[in-house]
Image (cartoon, rainbow, N blue to C red):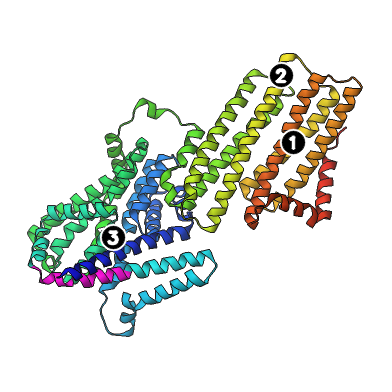
Amino acid sequence: MDLFDVLSMLGGLALFLYGMHSLGDGLEKLSGGKLETILEKLTSKPIFAVLLGAGVTAAIQSSSATTVMVVGFVNSGIMKLHQAVYIIMGANIGTTVTSWILSLTGVEGDNFIMQLLKPESFSPVFAFIGIIFLMFTKSEKKKVVGSILIGFAILMTGMGAMSAAVKPLAEVPEFTNILTVFKNPILGMIAGAILTAVIQSSSASVGILQALCATGVLSFSAALPIIMGQNIGTCVTAIISSIGTGKNARRTALVHLYFNIIGTVLFMILFYLLNAFIHFNFMDSQASEVSIAVVHSVFNILTVLVLFPFAGLLEKLACLTVKDNPENSVKKTQMEKDFRALDTRFLDVPGLAIAHSKSVAENMSELSKECLFKAMSLLTGYDEDLALEVSDLEDKVDKYEDELGTYLVKLSSKNLNENDSRMLSELLHCIGDFERISDHAINIQEAAKEMHDKELKFSEKAKTELSVFGQAVQDIVNLSFKVFKDNDDILATAVEPLEEAIDTLNYEIKNRHVRRLREGKCTIELGFVLSDVLVNYERISDHCSNIAVSLIQIHEDNYETHGYLDALKHKDEKNFKEKYNECLEHYILP
């Protein structure tokens, strides 16, 4: 084996690892976070959780990615530790699918079907179709499919290049001696664990082992302990991911480690004890790509079958390793749970990160609405405790905006699909409006406090007018927040006519107030308070309009707000005026 063979092998390895990475990224993007969302919600039954973990891992081609996500779910409180145990078991089964796909490089035969199954036959076809999808289609989904096909073609091409490059190693005595050393179960297991820990992918390390089958000198006795070690080495990714997390998240990573260590130790003790008495003949025979896939699958399936009844013990073992302390038993607030859901581990699965961000933003909107409605109630009956609640709610809304804004900015740097990109823009627009609405609530609270401290009271006429205006404001808040929650761009068109009606109410109430001032029925000091309240009410309706308009614009890829509003009012002027008049009729001032 000369220098050029080494370069070919390194090039093949690079293509193989890049292809695997590209394939996994494409599959994750195609799922749009849906698989992961299903994973976090549908894990109530143990057997179903195992199947789900296997299915998701097979789909995204990475048990490490699945386990890291599960660590994130547990850390954010979305998933319980005992649920995570079964998902991890399933992930170990799902990861064996990759080895079966890679075993196609060992397909031999001259008939048409066997020739068609060879990677050198179908990989160019996949690559050609993939490049057509990438270059000549506008559909984002087709482009993602194209990247998946090209990633798969690169993966198989790299696998073939590695296999071809290592063939000359069969004639190198030093290489044969190294493989002989790996026949020692302990050394082989350590080698497999180190290789997998370095590249952080058991699928990739199994693929490299399958490529070594091309040398013709890799025996079962050398391959078996390496495969066992690979299952331990893959735990490194989850362990690293759990650093700095909560106790249950660290326990989840340890469950993964304990599961693989216990399974490996049990399997090796049992197998080598039996081999000592029975002497399996196949141990000295040459290992093939298919046989490695078989061993990989059999080991992981048997481990799950053996340890499935003892999932509770694995959980207890992890809990004994990472013990509870008094502060761990303190119940988490909803805000703490929401902020934990914004886990940086999910940034690599943008669809899932967007889904979590939307859920947190919805909770933020509810806090903002509660803050406003409580502040409005202070105008009719001031209460110091309620005023403090308003301040506390506004403070929480500010914290939500800081956390969500920071998280969304990080997410914006990721490779987002079209739908995720739109949702990201919508969230960035809306959380600012939610925060501003809570600021106006504080202004209303201060106005109510000023009236209370100075013992000012609105006239019955002013109270009635403010009641009608306040109801209109509450209705537009409820409507626009529902538009945001349901992502309903059709319902959003009903917001602007109501906002126009609120502007008209504001103008009319101000005129009435001026008349009362002239007639001496209202004081200047009380007039200033009323004016402050009216301004805040009107601006709140403006923010509600922003929420609805931003959703419509983002859906239509039109970001010129004034132009859009002008078009909305004049494009279908008759329909807009009808809705506007309906709103005015609903909120009639006495």
Which residue is under mark 2? 450
* Type of amino acid at the residue the image marks with label 2: Glu
Q: Is mark 2 on a helix, strand or loop?
A: helix
Mark 2, other Cα within 10 Å: few <14 / some 14–19 / many ≥20? some
Q: Residue furthest top?
A: 454
Picture coordinates of residue 539, whole percent (x, y): 71, 36
Which residue is under mark 3? 204
Say if the magenta span includes residue 353.
no
Residue at the (32%, 46%) spot, across then down = 238
Q: Is mark 3 on a helix, strand or loop?
A: helix
Image vertical order of residue 185 relative to residue 111, above or below: above
C-alpha distance separating marks 2 and 1: 20 Å
Q: Which quarter of the picture shows residue 174?
A: bottom left
Q: What element carries label 1?
A: helix
Quadrant location, the C terminus:
top right
Which residue is under mark 1? 538
Per the rendered image, the range of residues in magenta is 156-172
Say if the magenta span includes residue 171.
yes
Q: Which of 55 and 537 is in front in this view?
A: 537
